[in-house]
Amino acid sequence: MTKVSTLVTGIGELVTLDPGQSIATGTSPDVARLGPLHDVAMVVEDGVIAWIGPAAQAPAADTRLDLDGRAVIPGFVDSHTHLVFAGDRSGEFAARMAGTAYDGGGIASTVAATRAATDEQLRALIARRVAEARAQGTTTLEIKSGYGLTVADEVRALRLAREVTPHTTFLGAHVVPREYASDRTAYVDLVTGPMLAAVTEVTADGADGEASRPAYLDVFCEPHSPHAFTADEARAILLAGRAAGLGLRVHGNQLGPGPGVLLACELGAASVDHCTYLSDADVDALAATGTVATLLPGVEFSTRMPYPDARRLLDAGVRVALASDCNPGTCYSSSMPFVVALAVRELRITPAEALYAATAGSGASLGLDVRVAVGEPAALAVLDAPSYLHLAYRPGVPIATALEVTARHTGQKPVPEIEGP
Ligand code: NIG
Ligand code: FE
């Protein structure tokens, strides 16, 4: 098959995330880490970057895309989303703005609506949300299950998610569903037993014949929610996931101080997400283990909670990621530019640190080495602006979109072989 190449010209600024680039002396370390280049052009061939070099030396290609001075950045990696759901909780949001606290209780209504939806309805909702994210510059998405909470509904959620991304996470331990409220142990047994077995053993299924085994298992470990899981329950669930060969993620320290961060670090989780309330021991453990601290400031915005202390994490050498947490309860926004703007304004990190966390940082939490370099997927976003600084400078203005020639990161970890029927 003939390869199709596109020469991209008129790039106002190219953010490469490549520290090997020669950067002007005097550039601050946070900006240098972005590896910004000027006066360059790029050739993309079948979704892969084939050439980057001085604009004056650009080679010929089949087609040409002139960006007229617009900036090109790595596409956002949204490493934490819950896109598989039906129903609406705008009333819960309104109540929260009037003073009601978030405690996870509203998840039950999304579970009911999601169970009642057909595959086709869910597929259409997911497609719309993915398109919405892509239209705002996201090229790589992680998607969790967690609104099914039965064996069949969790398998279905993961199968539908896998139709749109290889980065899927089993969140059967999102909350204890109502039907198990009086027997939490039975639900933990279900998650660690038949549910985990079903989601890790599913064979080829669905319209496109793709398997639905997730890459990760996640648990909502939160002593401040009566619906979420205790440290002991979360430990049992995470250990079962690890034994089944899944990578680990944790929702931790969201609503108050708690055991989630230390548990995630102890068990070698790829990421612990929220990290809103941290002790010195939590920060030390994150720095020592390399577990990524994923911050989700859209959640604090939408729940009127205090923002996490990103500065403290970065200064301690913790690997920090930014993601949307797009879900119907705590943050119904898929906008990574919004997240970046919030991080700069409310988490008080620099625009360069925020962009790094929303691309390289979030990529690292999914095992991806995100860079704009020859041989890498052309997972890129274009800004209707001359510089990445405009992401935070122009909040709420839709300046970012996935670049048309864009690919997406499909992951370096091969999806485990699935046994045939
Ligand atoms: O990441 N905290 C737990 N889970 C989600 C919210 C889910 C919901 O309320 O529907 C979160 O914030
Ligand atoms: Fe979440």
Image (cartoon, grey):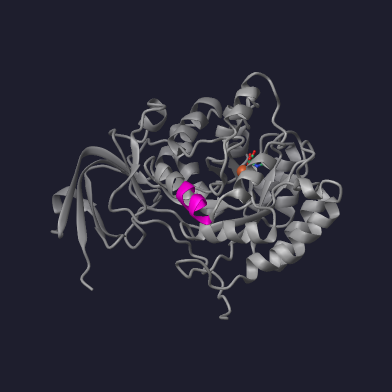
Could you tell me which quadrant the C terminus lies in? bottom right
Q: Is residue 124 magenta?
A: yes
Q: Judge left or right: residue 167 versus residue 11.
A: right
Who's the residue at 76% across and 65% down the image?
193
Within the image, what quadrant is residue 419 found in?
bottom right
Q: Is residue 367 at all visible to an observer of this figure?
A: no
Q: Judge left or right: residue 142 versus residue 183.
A: left
Which of these two is toward me, 118 or 127?
A: 118
Q: Main secondary structure of the magenta part?
A: helix
Who's the residue at 36% across and 60% down the image?
376
Q: Which residues are magenta?
A: 119-125
Q: Is residue 323 at all visible to an observer of this figure?
A: yes
Could you tell me which quadrant the N terminus lies in? bottom left
Give the farthest residue toward the top: 98
Q: Judge left or right: residue 108 versus residue 399.
A: right
Who's the residue at 69% across and 48% down the image?
174
Which of these two is toward me, 19 or 229?
A: 229
Within the image, what quadrant is residue 132 found in?
top left
Q: Is residue 302 above or below residue 110?
A: above
User: Where ligand 2 lies, by image quadrant?
Assistant: top right
How many labels, in total?
0
Q: Is residue 175 magenta?
A: no
Residue 156 in percent (x, y) is at 58, 59
Which of these two is toward me, 408 or 83?
A: 83
Which of these two is toward me, 256 or 147?
A: 147
Residue 291 in percent (x, y) is at 64, 51
Q: Judge left or right: residue 264 versus residue 381.
A: right
Within the image, what quadrant is residue 11 found in?
top left
Residue 66 in percent (x, y) is at 18, 45
